[in-house]
Image: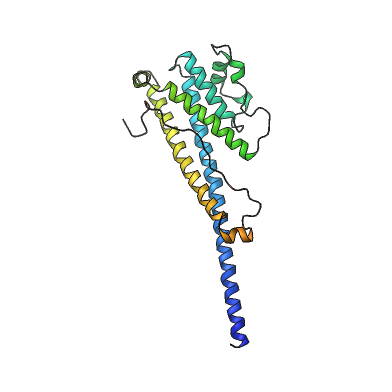
Amino acid sequence: MRWTEVAGTVVLVLAVLVWSVWVAASRLDRLHRKVGASRSVVQAQLVRRATVAAELATSGLLDPVSSVLVGEAAWSALNVDGSVARQEGPPELLALLLSDPRADGERALSSPAGDEVLSADALREERGQVESELSATLRAVLDDPDEIAAMRALPGGDELLDALSSAWYRAEIARRFHNEAVLQTQRVRRGRLVRLLRLAGHAPEPRTLELDDAWPGALPRPGVG
């Protein structure tokens, strides 16, 4: 084989290698962007669910103790990442928590993270915890079909429960999509070429958002009577 043929083969191999690295790096970059975008979507949907839960707590549709329990859980969810500044919190929700019939309202106003600056991992775990507590609280409050029917019969009850159902469903779908994007990114990061050439750079490996978002049995899903 002449030197020109050898040189051509080497150039071809290098070109294929460079192309493969470029494809892998581009794909990994797109996946990281996808994870970031899906994370923003799921956080927005969870904030929406907590906002509707806060509206439910202050609507007068629940008994006083249930209202405070839901209000506390909603407040924690809204404040887990500074989504709602304490001094700018919904005034109706603040009034409800301060009038806690269990004389525990001041505790309800504290943010889950306090003044501590949390890492991304700690913030994700904190969000998972407070969102799970909100889910559990809402399930306990919305566990009786007869009570749901009575709430729907009250002015504004039907619209508010439908809004909660829609927000909860959207949060479920958004979290599922986000976790699928995270798992796909993790698989690509484990690839031999990606690890050998350290194509991920200093970007932290994404983690799935784990939380309890099991649906309340007495609350119909959107589109289900």
Quarter of the image with the N terminus in it = bottom right
Q: Please, is residue 180 above or below residue 225 in the view?
A: below
The residue that appears at 58% across and 64% down in the rendered structure is 22
Which residue sits furthest left? 225
Q: In the picture provided, is 216 more to the left or to the right than 76?
A: left
The residue that appears at 48% across and 40% down in the rendered structure is 175
**Quadrant position of residue 99:** top right
Q: In the picture provided, is 59 more to the left or to the right than 111?
A: left
Q: How many marks?
A: 0
Colouring scheme, one of rainbow, by chain, secondary structure, one colour = rainbow
Q: Please, is residue 111 above or below residue 42 in the view?
A: above
Q: Please, is residue 137 above or below residue 121 in the view?
A: above
Q: In the picture provided, is 159 more to the left or to the right than 124?
A: left
Q: Point out residue 183 in the picture as x, y percentages from the top left corner.
A: 51, 48
Which residue sits furthest right? 116
Quarter of the image with the C terminus in it = top left
**Quadrant position of residue 216:** top left
The residue that appears at 53% across and 53% down in the rendered structure is 187
**Quadrant position of residue 164:** top left
The residue that appears at 48% across and 13% down in the rendered structure is 64
Q: Point out residue 171 in the picture as x, y percentages from the top left corner.
A: 47, 36
Q: Point out residue 10 in the picture as x, y percentages from the top left corner.
A: 60, 78
Q: Point out residue 71 in the picture as x, y percentages from the top left corner.
A: 52, 21
215 or 154, which lies in front? 215
